[in-house]
Amino acid sequence: MNYSIEQIKAIAPSVFTEAKASHLTDKYIQTPTIKVVEDLINLGWEVTKVQEVKSRKYAGFQKHLLMFRHPDIMIKGQNGDDAQPQILLTNSHDGKAAFNFRVGIFRFVCENGLVISDADFGVVSIRHVNYTFESLQAKVNEMISKLPGLVNKINLFKATTLTDTQMQQFATKACALRSKQTINIMSVLEATRKEDEGNDLWAVFNRVQEKLVNGMFKTGTRKARVIKNFQQDIKINEQLFELAESYI
């Protein structure tokens, strides 16, 4: 789903905030997130997800997330396992954050998003005071230029075969990122679709990531909850990617 400007405003009004929070001084330079959104749209990117955190103290100034995909940028995979790079933009208007950009991957077979945490794909920031259309365009071009490296990393994941012991070890460490309670490791490793079958690192990583983020497991007799807080979602995705990299 692509979101219109009107839909973004209905879901996350903080994206449109132009006024400064009352605790900020005149030295603070405010650039509304909607300015960045409109500039990314002008560069051909489409908004595919919108969220803001709940906040009473800083209502209207709280942290928010927008996710973008470009219809002309695609990662072709084997057997129809195609993916599309994503840009994750987070910001707040309470003076505590710059415009932060992360790279993600959207897999069509499971309609699931992965957030990349890698030495070449770290968080890219633009301070409000330094924001211009040209600075945004430069950062976006920088991220796009590194996409071949991302494809190579995915291919390394696919070329890395895990033993049964390594798969169970990976799932155990991954589950510890989500919960301190005992989780049925084998259920987390179980494939829910043909495309994710196998014991290569890419398949195992995707199976575990989907189960943990979407709450597709039980702690004891209780079913886990879907992660809805985007800050927690980003954190566990990045930690899972770093864990997977350690097995290459």
Image: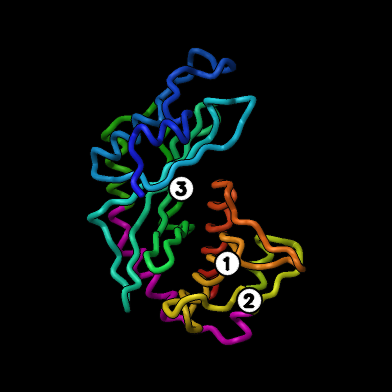
Q: Residue at x 27, y 48 (%)?
A: 141
| Nearer to me, 110 or 125 | 110
Q: Earlier in the sequence, mark 2 or mark 3?
A: 3
Q: On screen, 105 above or below 157?
A: above
Q: Report if residue 124 is visible in the image.
A: no
Image coords of residue 181 (percent x, y): 76, 64
Tell me the element at label 2: helix
In the picture, residue 173 is in which quadrant?
bottom right
The magenta region covers 144-168
Q: Which residue is mark 1?
A: 211
Crowding near the residue tagged with mark 1, few <14, some 14–19, many ≥20 C-alpha atoms within 10 Å: many
* Disc 3 and disc 1 in contact, CB within 8 angstroms: no
Identify the amino acid type marked 3.
Val
Category of crowding for the residue at label 2, using alpha-carbon neighbours closer than 10 angstroms: few (below 14), some (14–19), many (at least 20): some
For mark 3, what is the residue? 123
Q: Which mark is residue 187?
A: 2
Instruction: Name the amino acid type tagged 1.
Output: Lys
